[in-house]
């Protein structure tokens, strides 16, 4: 081996210096230091991949809310600024961003997440970092109950609540034989448990004849469909959504699944999931969703109008959730009068927020909001060219949420 | 004008050089023997001429025209045919299909304007053994049959120069005998043949001149009689 | 029961047809060019998107079906040919690793390109009216489209068979699959043959994508799903064999259809388990041809360089400098640097296997993940404290490496790469599906370090220490007689065998060590993040250290360190500015493979040695 040129011996330290130097100079910047600067909110969500049908309108609505709030003078006299991060539906990405937002950007509040798995991971991070986390969309009920803690709040009605709403209606049907198919992850399974546990209470004779848990993003359901139909269920319950649901509908329709069984789908009345199906959306399904076209309270009509003006499209469920999430955060900051986490948490407990769909409240003992959901039946609307919800009813959270003792019992079991 | 002329050829596998300044010449319609022990560099020489190995140094001329560095398929189209030492027939293909791979496609056949080229009929005339095996999978043929197929396949491309690498390797004496006659016929048909061999007597019966290779260098060149007469060379290198 | 078998069997058959078409193209391309084209799935996806766009463009016109049938696969086929001419042609002589990474880079680029053009939403392609609706079988509806596909499959198989046996092109392709060098020596223009093979192979992917589009939801993730399955099918059947692809497709199609019914919990593992069993028993697939052992490690060796000088003083300076950093850097950068240490250790462990052992593992994330799950399971499920958990966790990776290594070191490079990938997928699937133990998708949370290490700067020192120790250990192994034997095996396994070196034992031990160090990297990483997820075992995570090695330069001690640093730096900086980081990464990879196959360190050294008087200019010159 020939001996290297002398100068080359400086290469290793030089390289290391270069690395650290460019990391600090070009890496994510540090937070602005002085008071007139904006209040930073760190928002982590699944902006790429299967969830984007939901998260894109969600982000639009957040931007809209920020503009409106800042136009009114912001919070604590400072403008609000939201830093968006894409978790790609992956919990490790979520944590990575949470770390950057909290440690480097020193955001006041963490918010967002779509996937229950990401939500739980960011929640655990927030617990350890002692940072307020306003979970918008992860629906697993354990987030605020079994795995709940001081620093996590949730905006949307969870799997337990929505499952319960659907169970109350399903119990009135004559059917007894149930099959379930859902994505094999936290949300998919919890969305079934919430429903099934309640249904068995209301109607002890029901029986599960088939259960299938394909992986999230499976895309190929024909063998599952024939398997389900072979079990001859009267009801098929599904927690599929997004591209999985579209593929399922296309594959299940020619097998006659929607004629041969009554189908219940959690969230599947949301415009995100029903509109892409166009006029092939299955009719007569029992669903939870968001009939934005039919909610005619003045506050809501106004919200729809402003959103349309801004984006040129009608709101989705994601738009509503995003908007309410930001309203809640602004309200919490105002009430706390400070950006200290402990004060923010205390302010958020039992906080009332007035939203386009009426007032909601963050319950003090479990940090779950009382935002409700719409339950109804699907029908194709030839004029619009896609499916809508009919015979719908808004079920407020209070109607289906458990009381304090029950929550405490769950929390003890979860610790 | 020489049919094939190699000057100062140097070839290496990776970092280890194998050929050191090989030069050889073959006239039209002549058989030139390339002799040497196992590992001397015979196969490497033929592969390099065929463009299958990168050439470090040196030149190759075909009919006086420089062809160094051309890709194998161009060299083939220019008239060099290569019959590799381990035959390398396509086992999964039938005899007929093997021959078709070697055959000139119609387009090029007419462009070259040679009506007297090799076709199935003529190949089977030379190797009658093959004519009964047309639809057999080549992998099931005997060693001798495979060797004939390998030569026939190359002939289908109408070469002017044939690079024959140890055609007798592993063949039964009867087959070797038949092959000798067939190679002789090829020469009589006007082909120039560079014949690499370890069977010295076999090669010298066919060739008009010989090159002797030793560790990548040419250590002797001359007419066949000259070689047989040179006691020292025979003893040292050929052991005959 | 009859009904069940019929329906399940038919859906399995329909899926087998999609799989066959896709896998046949993949297998054809591999057979002739020896390139495993990961981008094959991207072509499938592109055709599905084109089908969608043509559908919206021509909706209602009578020629919609005909135009789509003609245009979608053809456009993709031409793209395939174009890519072959522009890019792949340059790497036929490159090491297998470079080829694999180049086609993987194309996957990244096409993935982002599709998102850019068609957006991220799921698109839906209507079933053509001709094949819409259902027919009654045993009194129950069955989709007509599936029957159409089931009919189409054998028709395509027949056409392909005719193409392969009755045309000159087909005969050339079959000949080239066996011995492409001989085919060129017989006057066939290899370049043109390869290009046409790419065109036909891509056409098949395009045709499958077009055919599948009405049955699925068209979305940007479909490329990876399909490539993995096509890959499994082609490998099971035998790469390069058409009938093998057909057999593999039927096996996988039906295995999935009935597996879902009878073993719903392990249905995902079944497919990969079958592939692993086949590869272990018949590495060249059920109907493929056995390949002789070749010294492909030699190709890699040709791209190697000494790396940055191994003198203790400059490296000590680096170490001391890093030791002092917490005094000046804010905590966030320390967190990033801690991640970097884990990444560097992972890359170094893989480089040990790849650069010195000549074994291209495409599933190194398995051992990183096993290390992190080892830690997670000990802390969360068994309640073991951190110091002990940290020491024990890598043993899980070691155990995994012992098992997987024993089964895979027998194979030559491409098949070794595929088997390691299959094992990583099996491990991933277990972590994903064994909900009760591993938490499935939720992963394991709350894996925090011992309180004394909780502060970022203390954990930084801890990670720096562990990483340095491991790197020094690896360095000693490389320089030991064992390391020398390993390199001898890499450069020429046959010669090493004839020298009396037990090649398999050496390779297996190297595999164990690489697994162990990857496991340590995993444990180091997990205690900093506090959680572990199935994604730590994913294909992407297996590719990352390969990219790092390629960035830095193969087989030198400093290469993976520089590579990891640059990768991390790019990741941290670029993701701030663009959502198309994948495409950018793909572009970087293409550039590296095509123009800088020796990596950054290799390039710098080459520049340096051109000026320096001491070096032999030949050694640095690119190969002919
Ligand atoms: N593929 C190869 N890689 C490295 N060395 C080779 C290769 N092929 C042949 N050699 C070496 O080149 C020399 C000449 O071999 P070859 O041309 O096959 O000799 P011959 O044909 O006269 O028996 C031998 O020393 C052999 O070991
Ligand atoms: Mg030889």
Image (tube, rainbow, N blue to C red):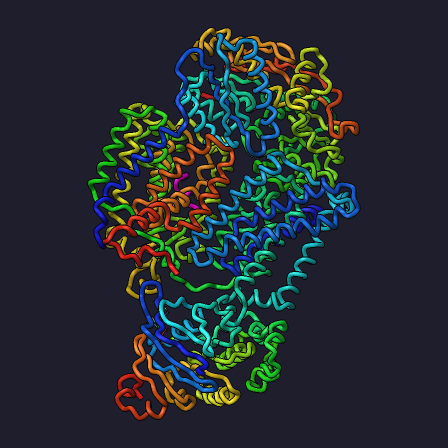
Q: Quadrant of residue C493?
A: bottom left
Q: Is residue C334 magenta-colored?
A: no
Q: Is residue C367 magenta-colored?
A: yes
Above or below for C597 versus A93:
below
Magenta segment, principal secondary structure?
helix
Q: In x, y percent, where is residue C110?
A: 55, 43
Seen from the viewer's position, the closer of residues B38 and A205 is B38
Q: Judge whether residue C395 can be spotted in this image.
A: no
**B98 on left or right of A28:** right
Q: In x, y percent, where is residue C478?
A: 27, 50
**A172 on left or right of B79:** right
Quadrant in the picture for the N terminus of chain B = bottom left
The residues colored magenta run C363-370
Above or below for B167 versus C530:
below
Q: Quadrant of residue B66?
A: bottom left
Q: In x, y percent, where is residue B83?
A: 47, 77
- Image point (77%, 43%), residue name: C133
Quarter of the image where ligand 1 sits:
bottom left
Q: In x, y percent, where is residue A370?
A: 59, 13
Q: Quadrant of residue A289?
A: top right
């Amino acid at each position: 081996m020939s001996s290297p040129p002398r100068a080359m011996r400086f290469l290793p330290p030089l390289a290391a210096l270069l690395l650290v130097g460019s990391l600090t100079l070009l890496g994510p910047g540090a937070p602005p230091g002085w008071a007139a600067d904006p209040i930073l909110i760190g928002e982590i969500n699944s902006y790429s991949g299967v969830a984007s049908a939901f998260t894109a309108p969600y982000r639009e609505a957040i931007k809209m809310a920020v503009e409106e709030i800042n136009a009114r003078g912001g919070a604590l006299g400072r403008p609000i600024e939201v830093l968006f991060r894409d978790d790609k539906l992956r919990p490790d990405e979520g944590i990575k961003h949470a770390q950057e937002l909290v440690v480097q950007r020193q955001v006041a509040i963490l918010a967002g997440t779509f996937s229950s798995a990401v939500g739980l991971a960011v929640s655990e991070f927030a617990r350890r970092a002692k940072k307020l986390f306003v979970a918008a969309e992860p629906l697993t009920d354990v987030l605020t109950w079994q795995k709940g803690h001081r620093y996590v709040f949730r905006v949307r009605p969870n799997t337990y609540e929505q499952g319960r709403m659907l169970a109350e209606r399903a119990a009135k049907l004559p059917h007894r034989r149930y099959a379930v198919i859902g994505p094999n992850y936290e949300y998919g399974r919890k969305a079934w448990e919430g429903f099934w546990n309640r249904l068995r209470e209301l109607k002890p004779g029901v029986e599960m004849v088939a259960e299938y848990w394909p992986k999230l993003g499976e895309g190929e359901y024909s063998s599952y469909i024939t398997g389900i139909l072979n079990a001859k269920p009267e009801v098929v319950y599904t927690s599929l959504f997004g591209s999985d649901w579209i593929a399922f509908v296309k594959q299940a329709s020619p097998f006659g699944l929607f004629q041969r069984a009554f189908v219940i789908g959690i969230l599947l009345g949301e415009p995100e999931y029903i509109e892409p199906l166009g006029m092939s959306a299955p009719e007569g399904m029992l669903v939870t969703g968001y009939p934005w076209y039919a909610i005619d309270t003045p506050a809501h009509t106004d919200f729809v109008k402003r959103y349309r003006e801004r984006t040129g499209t009608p709101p989705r469920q994601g738009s509503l959730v995003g908007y309410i999430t930001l309203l809640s955060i602004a309200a919490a900051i105002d009430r706390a009068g400070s950006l200290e986490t402990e004060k923010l948490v205390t302010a958020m407990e039992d906080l009332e927020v007035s939203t386009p769909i009426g007032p909601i409240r963050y319950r003090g003992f479990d940090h779950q909001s009382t935002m409700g959901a719409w339950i109804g039946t699907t029908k194709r609307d030839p004029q619009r060219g896609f499916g809508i919800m009919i015979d719908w009813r808004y079920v407020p959270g209070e109607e289906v949420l458990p009381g304090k003792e029950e929550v405490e019992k769950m929390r003890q079991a979860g610790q | 004008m020489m049919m094939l002329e190699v000057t100062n050829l140097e070839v290496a596998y990776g970092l280890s050089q194998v050929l050191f300044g090989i030069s050889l010449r073959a006239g039209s319609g002549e058989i030139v023997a390339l002799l040497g022990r196992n590992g001397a560099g015979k196969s490497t020489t033929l592969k390099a001429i065929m463009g299958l190995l990168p050439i470090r140094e040196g030149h190759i001329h075909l009919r006086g025209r420089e062809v160094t560095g051309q890709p194998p398929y161009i060299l083939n189209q220019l008239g060099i045919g290569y019959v590799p030492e381990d035959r390398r027939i396509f086992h999964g293909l039938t005899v007929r299909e093997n021959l078709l791979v070697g055959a000139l496609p119609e387009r090029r056949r007419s462009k070259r304007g040679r009506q007297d080229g090799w076709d199935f009929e003529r190949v089977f005339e030379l190797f009658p053994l093959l004519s009964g095996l047309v639809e057999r999978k080549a992998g099931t043929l005997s060693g001798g049959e495979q060797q004939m197929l390998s030569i026939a396949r190359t002939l289908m491309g109408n070469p002017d120069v044939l690079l024959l690498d140890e055609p007798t390797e592993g063949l039964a004496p009867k087959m070797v005998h038949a092959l000798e006659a067939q190679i002789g016929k090829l020469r009589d048909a006007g082909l120039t043949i560079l014949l690499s061999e370890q069977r010295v007597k076999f090669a010298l019966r066919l060739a008009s001149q010989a090159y002797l290779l030793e560790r990548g260098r040419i250590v002797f060149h001359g007419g066949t009689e000259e070689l047989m007469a040179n006691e020292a060379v025979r003893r040292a290198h050929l052991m005959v | 029961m009859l009904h069940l078998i019929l329906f399940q069997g038919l859906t399995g058959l329909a899926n087998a047809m999609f799989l066959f078409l896709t896998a046949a193209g993949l297998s054809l391309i591999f057979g002739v060019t020896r390139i495993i084209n990961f981008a094959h799935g991207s072509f499938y996806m592109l055709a599905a998107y084109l089908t969608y766009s043509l559908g919206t463009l021509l909706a209602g016109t009578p020629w919609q079906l005909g135009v789509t049938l003609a245009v979608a696969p053809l456009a993709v086929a031409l793209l395939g040919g174009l890519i072959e001419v522009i890019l792949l042609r340059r790497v036929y002589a490159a090491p297998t690793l470079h080829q694999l990474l180049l086609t993987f880079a194309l996957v990244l680029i096409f993935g982002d390109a599709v998102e850019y053009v068609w957006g991220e939403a799921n698109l839906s392609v209507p079933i053509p009216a001709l094949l819409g609706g259902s027919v009654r079988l045993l009194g129950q509806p069955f989709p007509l489209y599936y029957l159409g596909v089931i009919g189409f499959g054998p028709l395509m198989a027949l056409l392909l068979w005719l193409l392969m046996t009755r045309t000159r092109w087909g005969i050339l392709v079959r000949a080239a699959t066996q011995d492409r060098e001989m085919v060129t020596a017989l006057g066939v223009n290899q370049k043109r043959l390869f290009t046409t093979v790419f065109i036909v192979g891509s056409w098949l992917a395009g045709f499958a994508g077009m055919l599948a589009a009405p049955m699925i939801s068209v979305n940007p993730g479909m490329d990876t799903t399909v490539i993995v399955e096509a890959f499994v099918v082609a490998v099971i059947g035998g790469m390069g064999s058409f009938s093998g692809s057909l057999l593999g497709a039927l096996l996988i199609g039906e295995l999935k259809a009935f597996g879902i019914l009878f073993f719903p919990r392990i249905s995902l593992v079944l497919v990969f388990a079958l592939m692993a069993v086949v590869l272990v028993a018949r590495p060249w697939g059920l109907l493929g041809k056995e390949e002789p052992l070749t010294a492909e490690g030699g190709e890699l060796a040709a791209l190697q360089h000494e790396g940055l000088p191994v003198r203790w003083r400059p490296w000590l300076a680096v170490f001391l400098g890093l030791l002092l950093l917490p005094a000046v850097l804010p905590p966030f950068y320390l967190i990033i640097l801690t991640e970097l240490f884990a990444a560097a250790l992972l890359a170094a462990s893989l480089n040990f296997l790849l650069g010195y052992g000549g074994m291209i593992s495409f599933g190194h994330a398995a051992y990183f993940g096993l290390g992190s799950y080892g830690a997670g399971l000990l802390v969360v499920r068994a309640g073991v404290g951190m110091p002990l958990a940290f020491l024990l966790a890598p043993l899980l990776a070691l155990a995994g490496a012992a098992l997987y290594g024993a089964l895979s070191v027998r194979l030559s490079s491409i098949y070794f790469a595929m088997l390691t990938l299959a094992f990583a997928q099996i491990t991933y699937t277990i972590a994903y599906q064994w909900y009760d133990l591993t938490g499935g998708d939720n992963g394991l949370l709350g894996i925090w370090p011992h309180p004394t290490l909780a502060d970022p700067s203390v954990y930084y020192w801890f990670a720096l220490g562990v990483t340095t120790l491991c790197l020094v250990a690896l360095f000693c192994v490389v320089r030991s007689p064992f390391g020398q034997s390993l390199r001898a095996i890499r450069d020429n396994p046959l010669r090493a065998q004839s020298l009396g070196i037990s090649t398999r034992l050496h390779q297996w031990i190297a595999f164990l060590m690489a697994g162990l160090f990857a496991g340590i990297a995993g444990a180091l990483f997990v205690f900093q993040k506090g959680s572990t997820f199935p994604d730590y075992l994913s294909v992407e995570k297996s590719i990352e250290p390969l990219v790092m090695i390629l960035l830095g330069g193969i087989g030198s001690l400093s290469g993976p360190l520089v590579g990891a640093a640059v990768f991390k730096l790019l990741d941290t900086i670029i993701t701030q500015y663009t959502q198309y980081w994948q495409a950018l990464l793909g572009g970087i990879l293409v550039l590296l493979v095509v123009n800088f196959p020796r990596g950054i360190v290799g390039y710098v050294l080459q520049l340096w040695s051109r000026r320096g008087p001491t070096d032999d200019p030949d050694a640095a010159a690119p190969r002919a």
